[in-house]
Image: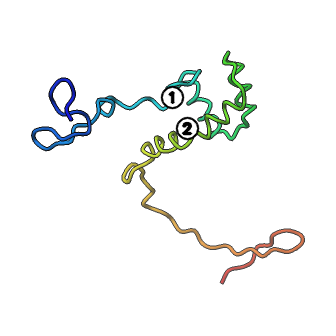
Amino acid sequence: MSPAGGGPGPGQTGWCGDVIDSPASVLPPRSAFAGFRFPAEVIVVAVRWYLRFNLSYRGIEELLAERGVEVDHVSVFRWVHRFASLLVDAARFCRYSPGDRWFVDETTQLPPVLHTGYVGGLRKCATA
């Protein structure tokens, strides 16, 4: 079946045998934050504070209220459950890659000092 234009419709094969996708699949994907009342920046900051500083949902509610954003702690709870995995995945690429760190190559060895413990504290022992 062809549409009114004469060519193949969505999901049908064209003249070269390729399957033609629907126009909706060609559009860019919607943002994960689309449809929320608050801007994406507010949501990301709230979720980041929760993950980084181990704050409670009510604590984040208070911090946002100090900055002029009136939000309920239940909204923060929903944001954390929905967007925490996205932020963790995004942060994974920012971690160190091999070769970004350096270590001290030269170390010195100090002579060992033995200590034995007793009720009064530590007493130095002579080494052989």
| Callout 2 secondary element | helix
Where, by quadrant of the figure, is residue 50 drawn? top right
Position in image of residue 44 (x %, y %): 56, 30
In this view, 28 is above or below 66: below
Seen from the viewer's position, the closer of residues 128 and 109 is 109
At 66% from the left edge and 32% from the top edge, which residue is drawn? 76
At 72% from the left edge and 79% from the top edge, which residue is drawn? 126
Relative to residue 65, is residue 32 drawn left or right?
Answer: left
| Callout 1 secondary element | loop
Q: Reading the chain from its start, which is encountered first: label 2 or label 1?
A: 1
Crowding around mark 2 (Cα neighbors within 10 Å: few <14, some 14 to 19, many 20+) is some
Q: Which residue of the protein is positioned furthest toward the right in this rendering?
A: 119
Circle 2 sits on which residue?
A: 83
Q: Report the Cα–Cα distance between label 2 and label 1.
A: 9 Å
Which of the labelled discs sits on residue 33, or is there none?
Answer: 1
Position in image of residue 65 (x %, y %): 71, 20
Quarter of the image that includes the N terminus: top left
Q: Which residue of the protein is positioned furthest toward the bottom in this rendering?
A: 128
Where, by quadrant of the figure, is residue 11 drawn? top left
Where, by quadrant of the figure, is residue 105 drawn? bottom left
Crowding around mark 1 (Cα neighbors within 10 Å: few <14, some 14 to 19, many 20+) is some
In this view, 87 is above or below 118: above
Seen from the viewer's position, the closer of residues 6 and 27 is 6
In this view, 53 is above or below 115: above
In this view, 94 is above or below 116: above
Q: How is the image coloured?
A: rainbow
Q: Which residue of the protein is positioned furthest toward the front in this rendering?
A: 1
Seen from the viewer's position, the closer of residues 76 and 51 is 76
At 85% from the left edge and 68% from the top edge, which residue is drawn? 121
At 57% from the left edge and 41% from the top edge, which residue is drawn? 84
Position in image of residue 102 (x %, y %): 42, 52
Dot 2 amino acid type: Phe
